[in-house]
Amino acid sequence: MSEHSNSAHAKSPLKMYFSIWAALLICTYITYKAAFIELGSFNAAVALGIATLKATLVALFFMHVWHASEKLTKLVVIAALFFLLLLLGLTMTDYATRPWS
């Protein structure tokens, strides 16, 4: 097999991967600590917000969306984030308006 010198994907340095991994670990720790803080109806919103941040980091760096050169890839990711925010917004609206006994 021949080596392809014109790779479409830029190689990311190992330091960046470990930095993102550390950020994911910190976000996981923040999620753990936030579970013990009484925020009322905002507990789920905080947990979903942190989970969304972690998913965004994974998609951007480990799935190489950040360095994608195709416009279609970026369009699909932006559309997916829009629908995720729409889904979370409608879910949290339903959750916030439920009568609690």
Image (tube, rainbow, N blue to C red):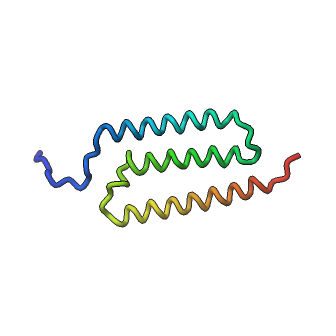
Percent of width and height locating residue 92: 69, 55
- Residue at 53% x, 39% y: name it: 27
Side (left or right) of 62 relative to 89: left
Q: Position of residue 34 (x, y in %)?
A: 65, 37
Q: Which residue is drawn at 76% across and 54% down?
A: 96
Is 44 located above or below residue 8 in the figure?
A: above
Q: In this view, does 32 lie above or below 9?
A: above
**53 up-or-down from 81: above or below:** above
Which quadrant is home to the N terminus? top left
Q: Is residue 5 left or right of residue 69?
A: left
Taking the spot 70% from the left edge, 36% from the top edge, the residue there is 37
x and y, in percent, of residue 66 in the image: 36, 54
The answer to whether residue 77 is left or right of residue 93 is left
Residue at image point 71% right, 47% down? 42
Q: Residue 13: x percent and y percent?
A: 28, 41
Splitting the image into 4 quarters, where does residue 6 fall? bottom left
Q: Is residue 72 left or right of residue 80?
A: left
- Residue furthest to the right in view is 101
> Can you tell which quarter of the image residue 94 is in?
bottom right
Q: In this view, does 85 lie above or below 29?
A: below
Total tally of numbered discs in the picture:
0
